[in-house]
Image (tube, rainbow, N blue to C red):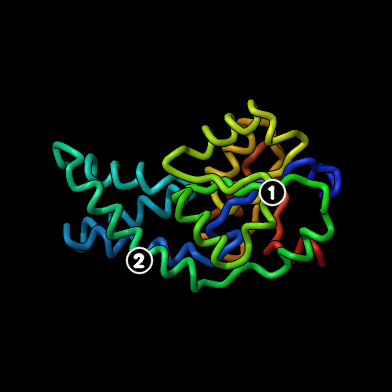
Amino acid sequence: MVRALTEYRSLVFDCDGVLLDSNRVKTDAFYQAALPFGESAANALVNYHVANGGVSRYRKFEYFLGEIVRYEDMEPLNELLSRYAERVRDGLLACSVTDGLGELRSALPNSNWMIVSGGDQSELREVFEARGLAHYFNGGIFGSPTDKQEILLRELKCGNLVLPAVFLGDSRYDYESAMKFGLDFVFISQWTEFSGWQEYFADQPTAVVHYESISSLVD
């Protein structure tokens, strides 16, 4: 980190792979949702999903229909989204939560915390409320169908996201989004599906801070 955590006015968290051990839940859900189109198509969607971590399900299924199975229209989109959501919700309610979240919040009582995720916003809010985690995020819980970069821009403009700020993420898109809007970035590797992240970050012009998990920040 460029600064000590206590110097940041805002902390932005990705959800999947950072707060929740849910990357595999979503990868499996993409595969099962697309399976009626055939194993080859389902595997192609999984590969696209993993290569584009942090991008919303809406964009991924639109890509699936338009580029992988080459439908002329988006008619099956709602059915795909529904099948995916049914599998994901149960997984989000059952998967592991990162250690150290409460301790980190206690250490940073004055900072504004928010979630900016590629996951569905309504689903995220429901899950975090049900799991007793929503109260940590006084700045809000935000997700798709609005894109992460659109969320960051909106929250900066309205004054909810105040700099200096740091984005804690596990994907290339998280990093790119942080850089675009002047946030520092911390890569959390514990549950990432970002293959080759070491080489990617080694090639960046500025050194990227890496921690294994949220709990590592409070050790």
Which residue is found at the position 28% from the left and 54% from the top? 44
The secondary element bearing badge 2 is classed as helix
The foreground one among 107 and 30 is: 107
Please identify, in this view, whether the residue under mark 2 or under mark 1 is nearer the observer.
Answer: 1
The residue that mark 2 highlights is: 87
Q: Quadrant of the C terminus?
A: bottom right
Please tell me which residue lies in front, 46 or 143: 143
Give the tally of numbered discs.
Answer: 2
Left or right: where does residue 130 sit relative to residue 12?
left
Element carrying mark 1: loop
Quick one: label 2 or label 1, which is nearer the N terminus? 2
Dividing the picture into quarters, in which one does residue 157 lie? top right
Please provide percent x and percent y for residue 32.
28, 65
Residue 74 screen position, x and y as percent:
20, 40
Look at the picture and state if 138 lies above or below 159.
Answer: below
Q: Give the residue number, with chain letter if any, for mark 1.
A: 138
Q: Is residue 207 visible?
A: no
- Residue 188, can we see it? yes
Could you say which quadrant of the image residue 189 lies in? bottom right
Residue found farthest to the left? 72
Q: Is residue 78 left or right of residue 162?
A: left
Q: Amino acid at mark 1?
A: Asn
The location of residue 50, given as percent across then percent down, is 42, 55
Q: Position of residue 165 (x, y in %)?
A: 73, 39
